[in-house]
């Protein structure tokens, strides 16, 4: 179970968080060392006392930066395990003297998102699919796993809504905005989705070039390709960043935080509140540039 859960976390870090290959490899090494330390117990049997003993050993043998990275790997992994309901309790919450520092998401600027989305050519079946994918991720803020899981029957064009299935198989409705509707029209037209191999047999909305369901790894490659075309650094763009950007830009334009919570499928309003900090930071930056008295 432990190795399988670790593999799932590595994929999540790579695809949804867009972490670099070096960071993912370092986290994998740190977590494997931890699993060796607690073996034969699994991650769900580990206590906060076990963690404190492990971290004490790290501090005695490794540099502070290396210890900090190992702790970050542990916190991130246990957060993932709890969210995926693979463990019930996060023992890292009780690590003494290791206060968790919340990192703010780094959204793209609105102009960068426009370059990314508008830069998709739109002629071939794959181009049209890519435009739907990017408009879906940014337009609704859905997770990459939710986007690739959308079926044809989940798209209600008459009502302007899409049903997505989130964590814990919880369903929610997300709206189809104008830009996404235009992209869907092009994808539905001759030479769009129907032009992909096996499209008639597939039930998922987004297909790969062989006519099968698009994978998370496939999404990562698509985003990287279009980021390069738009002149945006590849490491700055991922499905997760587009989700962050959707939430931040909505709050920047006055959206109610509970509406954003519902749109993103957050179980707790506390998860959504991190975006208010990002929006406030943006407000401070604009104010310092624009207000005469702020510049004196």
Image (cartoon, rainbow, N blue to C red):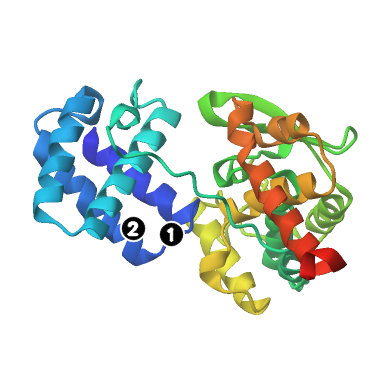
Q: Which element is circle 2 on?
A: helix
> Mark 2 sits on what residue?
24
| Residue shown at 67% from the left, 48% from the top | 200
- Left or right: 3, with 254 as reference point: left
Determine whether 199 is above or below 150 in the image.
below
Spot the residue most to the front. 296
Instruction: Choose between 175 and 247: the one closer to the eye.
Output: 247
Q: Position of residue 168 (x, y in %)?
A: 52, 24
Mark 1 / mark 2, whichever is N-terminal: 1
User: Alpha-carbon neighbours of circle 2 within 10 Å: few (<14), some, or many (≥20)?
Assistant: some
- Left or right: 151, with 2 as reference point: right
Q: CA distance from mark 1 to mark 2?
A: 6 Å
**Residue 114 marker:** none
> Mark 1 sits on what residue?
19
Number of callouts: 2
Look at the image and tell me in which quarter the N terminus lies: top left
Spot the residue most to the top. 88
Q: Quadrant of residue 140?
A: top right
| Residue shown at 25% from the left, 25% from the top | 44
Q: Which element is circle 1 on?
A: loop
- Left or right: 138, with 208 as reference point: right
Instruction: Choose between 180 and 236: the one closer to the eye.
Output: 236
Determine whether 148 is above or below 61 in the image.
above
Look at the image and tell me in which quarter the C terminus lies: bottom right
| Residue shown at 74% from the left, 65% from the top | 117
Pointers 1 and 2 in contact (CB under 8 A)?
yes
User: Alpha-carbon neighbours of circle 1 within 10 Å: few (<14), some, or many (≥20)?
Assistant: some
Residue 26, visible in the rendered structure: yes
Instruction: Choose between 285 and 295: the one closer to the eye.
Output: 295
Q: Position of residue 262 (x, y in %)?
A: 71, 30
Q: Position of residue 62 (x, y in %)?
A: 14, 56
């Amino acid at each position: 179970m432990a190795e399988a859960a670790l593999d799932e976390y590595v994929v999540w870090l790579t695809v949804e968080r867009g972490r670099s290959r070096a960071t993912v490899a370092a986290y994998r090494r740190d977590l494997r060392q931890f699993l060796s330390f607690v073996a034969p117990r699994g991650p769900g049997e580990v206590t906060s006392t076990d963690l404190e003993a492990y971290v004490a050993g790290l501090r005695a043998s490794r540099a502070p930066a290396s210890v900090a990275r190992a702790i970050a790997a542990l916190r991130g992994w246990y957060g993932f395990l709890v969210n995926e309901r693979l463990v019930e309790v996060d023992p890292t919450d009780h690590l003494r003297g290791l206060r968790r520092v919340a990192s703010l998401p780094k959204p793209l600027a609105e102009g960068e998102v426009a370059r990314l989305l508008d830069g998709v050519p739109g002629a071939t079946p794959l181009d049209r699919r890519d435009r739907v994918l990017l408009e879906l991720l940014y337009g609704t803020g859905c997770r990459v796993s939710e986007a690739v899981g959308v079926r044809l029957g989940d798209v209600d064009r008459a009502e302007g809504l899409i049903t997505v299935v989130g964590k814990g198989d919880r369903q929610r409705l997300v709206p189809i905005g104008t830009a996404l509707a235009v992209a869907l029209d092009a994808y539905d037209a001759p030479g769009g989705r129907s032009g992909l191999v096996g499209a008639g047999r597939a039930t998922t909305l987004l297909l790969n070039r062989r006519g099968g369901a698009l994978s998370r790894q496939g999404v990562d490659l698509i985003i990287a390709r279009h980021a390069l075309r738009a002149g945006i650094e590849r490491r700055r763009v991922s499905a997760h960043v587009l989700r962050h950007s959707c939430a931040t830009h909505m709050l920047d334009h006055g959206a109610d935080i509970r509406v954003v919570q519902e749109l993103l499928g957050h179980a707790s309003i506390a998860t959504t509140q991190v975006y208010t900090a990002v929006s406030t930071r943006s407000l401070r930056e604009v104010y310092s540039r624009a207000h005469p008295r702020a510049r004196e």
